[in-house]
């Protein structure tokens, strides 16, 4: 069964690499970068996403056989 990743994402990776940075993305390109630190490269972002997934994969979990519908408020808000 395919794992449901809950914390993996571009914005999570950017926040880990450059906490509190203000930015906007268009696909893989920063169109706004309001931070004195250099923007992370797309390679850095992808590497961080892979590390997050490795971490999530290291945690034992039991997935549901049938996914809940997205309109189910309990699944949307985590119960």
Image (cartoon, rainbow, N blue to C red):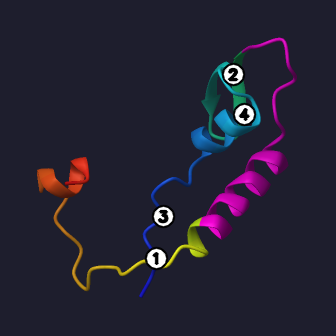
Front disc: 1 or 4 = 1
Identify the secondary structure beneath mark 2: strand
Front disc: 3 or 2 = 3
Q: Residue 31 carries which label?
A: 2
Front disc: 1 or 2 = 1
User: In this image, 74 relative to 57: left or right?
Assistant: left
Rendered location of residue 38, percent (x, y): 87, 23
Q: Give the range drawn in magenta.
A: 34-55
Tell me how far mark 3 sits from mark 4, CA to CA: 24 Å
Mark 3 or mark 2: which comes first in sequence?
3
Instruction: Report if the CB atoms under discs 3 and 2 are less than 8 Å apart.
Output: no
Residue appearing at x 72%, y 61% in the figure: 51
Label 2 environment density (alpha carbons within 10 Å; few <14, some 14–19, many ≥20): few
Residue appearing at x 12%, y 56% in the figure: 72
Residue extending farthest to the left is 72
Q: Which residue is under mark 1?
A: 3
Instruction: Report if the CB atoms under discs 2 and 4 are less than 8 Å apart.
Output: yes
């Amino acid at each position: 069964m395919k794992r449901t990743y809950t914390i993996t994402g571009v914005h999570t990776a950017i926040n880990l690499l450059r906490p509190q940075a203000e930015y906007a993305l268009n696909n893989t390109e920063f169109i706004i970068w309001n931070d004195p630190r250099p923007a992370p490269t797309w390679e850095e972002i992808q590497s961080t996403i892979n590390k997050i997934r490795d971490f999530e994969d290291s945690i034992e979990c039991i997935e549901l056989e049938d996914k809940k519908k997205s309109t189910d408020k309990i699944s949307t808000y985590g119960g």
